[in-house]
Image: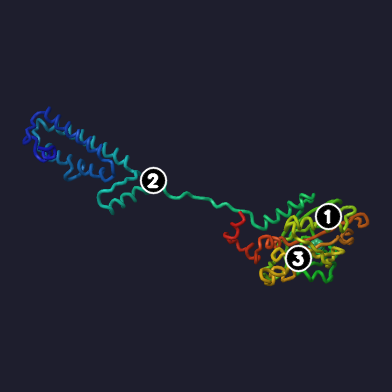
Amino acid sequence: MTLDEKLRKPLSEIGVTSAEQCQSLFEELNQRLQEDSAAARSSAKVEGFRIDWLGRKNGRLSLLSDNWLKAASSQLKPVVGKLLNGLRIEAEKRLNELMAETKGKIEVRVEGNLDQWKGEVQTELRSVPDITLPGLSHQFGAKHPLTLVREEIEEIFISMGYTVEEGPEIETAYYNFEALNTPENHPARSEQDTFFIRDGGAGRDELLLRTHTSPVQIHTMERMKPPVRAIVPGKVYRRDNPDATHTPMFHQIEGFAVDVDISFCEFKGTLEYFLKAFFGPEKRVRFRPSYFPFTEPSAEVDISCGICGGTGRVGQGIPCRVCKQSGWVEVMGAGMIHPAVFQYVGYDPEEYSGFAFGLGLDRYTMLKYNMPSLDYFFNNDIRFLEQFK
Ligand code: PHE
């Protein structure tokens, strides 16, 4: 007779009449309990262990209580009761241990009902980190192309002994126009469509968004005595309608040098050196006469077109769109600083001379990277910006 068959009969029927026999029967049961708990290596098996031993209806301990304890002789009853109690405590202890062990464990089994297995695995996975998931990666930013080009231009001028200066974006009409030899009612004021932000009058000057970086020439010269060699990168504002080559805010880099005996030769030589360093030594540089109120003489500076090599045509004679067939692209306005400007800052024009230039950083960046439109700078498309890492 198996142990389980014995459980279904009263002790008297299986020939157990003494306390010693009871004792060895319970030892056998305890042995079986230990084996079962050692074999319960999955949550399903732990549940099986619970049902087999502690199940309400047909669990071994219930059967023991019903069949052995209740029908035991008054002499054996306390013995069976005590052994049964000991066995119950042991079964509960084992069950608790098994539940703690299997919690949070990933089980892989191939037998049994697949849907049930999936459910179990999912339930258990919730409590453990899934080390098979891809890691979290951080996106690293990159410098904006305008920043890269600004820094490159700064480096070239720093190598020639220039300092980098800054000035305010909100200006008075005095700094933006008047001290640059552009008095009220001067026609040049209307050439730069200006955002005015406060009216003048009653002893105060008009406030506006600077239309160029040239006012920083004045601020810097007010602060410093010659020799001065400086460049000034910064934002400037004009009331232009936005298109592929215009935005109401754009970037300039101003540059100027003031010292005794600064000649037109140094002016030309410095700009040629810079333009070849930035655009490439094969470029040709040309100065065309022009007009600015704050320089005399004034020039527009061109370089030979990098797309058509200065021929005005690409491939099989197709007109070059970048230089509009002229073979040249304009890259800055410049000139020798007007003596009247020196007077505004208290420099003696008999003693000092100098030159100044202004260039469009956005345009330089477009030329450098062959970009068709300014849009790319401002619409924050990560696919565009990532190329500059
Ligand atoms: N400030 C001028 C502009 O914005 C450029 C310039 C600067 C010209 C310095 C001459 C000297 O158009």
- Asked whether the residues under the numbered discs 3 and 2 touch, taking CB atoms below 8 Å apart as contact, a structural biologist would say no
In this view, the residue in front, 23 or 308, is 308
Left/right placement of residue 118 relative to residue 161 reads left
Amino acid at circle 3: Glu
Measured as percent of width and height from the top left, residue 315 is found at: 66, 68
Q: What numbered label is drawn on residue 128?
A: 2
The disc placed on residue 257 is 1
Establish if 93 lies above or below 378: above
The residue drawn where x is 11% and y is 31% is 76
Estimate the x, y position of residue 243 in percent, counting from the top left. 66, 70
341 vs 31: above or below: below
Q: Residues within 10 Å of mark 3 (few under 14, many from 20)?
A: some
In primary-sequence order, the first of circles 1 and 3 is 1
Q: Earlier in the sequence, mark 3 or mark 2?
A: 2
The amino acid marked with disc number 2 is Val
Q: What residue type is labelled 1?
A: Ala
Is residue 85 visible in this depiction of the protein? no
Gap between marks 3 and 2 measured at Cα: 65 Å
For the question of whether residue 25 can be seen, the reply is: yes
* Label 3 beta carbon less than 8 Å to ligand 1: no
SS label for mark 3:
strand
Q: Which of marks 1 and 2 is nearer the N terminus?
A: 2
Q: Nearer the viewer, mark 1 or mark 3?
A: 3
